[in-house]
């Protein structure tokens, strides 16, 4: 076996392992571990593709492994993080679990995060069979939504007002339904490959990244959560220059 050709796959396995550990941490309600593991998963997800290009190695099994790892780390894992967080905070009898007059709606709302896992699977399958562009994604990338999901529990604990907003049943429904819908939408959102030939888009990318850095340094996890909305807003404002 050629060790060189297996390096990208080993990095993909590391991403997959991080995803499974995120799920375990979510059920343990250890959301600090979730944040660290999510950052590691994102790094490994970036490195496996980078390593494959630098080493000039490609394989069909590598593509399948990458898609499976992304499904776990950025599809199933964020769904379970929100399911466990909101289940603990909102439906423990101390929250607003009786917001809806129909009891069955109160019982069903905690399962809405699972829509993210379902639609992420469809998003990844759609991505695998579509022509890829270096400038944009069609539909919200799964890692973008996943990172907001991973940041949300710690963001909600930073401020009392944030906790009220981010655990409100209407927000839960909107975030899960709209977020899932954006995953499979035809909306064009730019990729973060700054070195592309589209110079105007590169300027927008850099501006967005600077705004996100400021938000994270200023508001920490709440700022990281807001980066999802910054990404969407910047993409919407750049529709005319997205190829």
Image: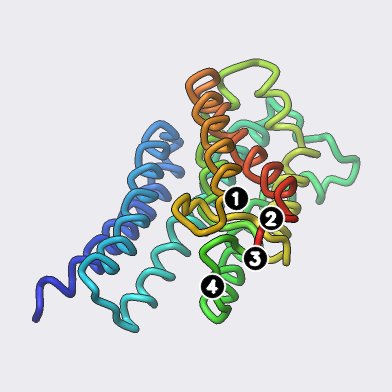
Residues at circles 4 and 2 in contact by the CB criterion of under 8 Å: no
In the image, is 13 to the left or to the right of 134?
left
Instruction: Please name which of the two marks, 4 or 2, marks the residue nearer to the observer.
Output: 2
Question: 70 or 203, which is in the foreground?
Answer: 203
> Of marks 4 and 3, which one's residue comes earlier in the chain?
4
Q: Gap between marks 2 and 1, in whole Å? A: 7 Å
Q: Residue 241 carries which label?
A: 2
Residue labelled with disc 4: 132
Of label 2 and label 3, which has the lower sequence position?
3
- Category of crowding for the residue at label 2, using alpha-carbon neighbours closer than 10 angstroms: few (below 14), some (14–19), many (at least 20): some
Marks 4 and 3 sit apart, C-alpha to C-alpha, by: 9 Å
**Mark identifier at residue 42:** none
- Mark carried by residue 138: 3
Q: Name the residue under label 1.
A: 201
For the C terminus, give its image quadrant: bottom right
Q: Label 1 near label 2: C-beta < 8 Å? A: yes
In primary-sequence order, the first of circles 1 and 3 is: 3
Q: Which mark is first along the chain, 4 or 1?
A: 4
């Amino acid at each position: 076996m050629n060790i060189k050709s297996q390096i990208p796959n080993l990095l993909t396995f590391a991403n997959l392992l991080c995803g499974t550990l995120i799920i375990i941490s979510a059920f343990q309600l250890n959301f600090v571990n979730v944040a660290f593991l999510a950052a590691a998963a994102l790094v490994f997800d970036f490195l496996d593709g980078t390593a494959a290009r630098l080493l000039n190695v490609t394989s069909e099994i590598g593509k399948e492994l990458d898609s499976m790892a992304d499904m776990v780390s950025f599809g199933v894992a964020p769904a379970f993080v929100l399911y466990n967080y909101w289940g603990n905070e909102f439906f423990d009898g101390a929250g607003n679990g009786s917001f809806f007059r129909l009891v069955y709606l109160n019982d069903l709302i905690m399962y809405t995060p699972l829509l993210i896992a379902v639609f992420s699977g469809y998003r990844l399958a759609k991505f695998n069979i579509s022509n890829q562009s270096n400038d944009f994604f069609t539909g919200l990338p799964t890692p973008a939504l996943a990172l907001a999901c991973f940041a949300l529990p710690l963001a909600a604990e930073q401020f009392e007002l944030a906790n009220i907003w981010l655990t409100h049943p209407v927000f839960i429904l909107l975030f899960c339904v709209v977020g899932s819908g954006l995953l499979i939408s035809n909306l064009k959102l730019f990729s973060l490959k700054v070195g592309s030939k589209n110079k105007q888009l590169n300027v927008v990318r850099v501006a967005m990244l600077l705004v996100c850095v400021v938000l994270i340094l200023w508001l920490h996890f709440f700022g990281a959560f807001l980066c999802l909305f910054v990404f969407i807003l910047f993409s919407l404002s750049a529709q005319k220059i997205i190829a």
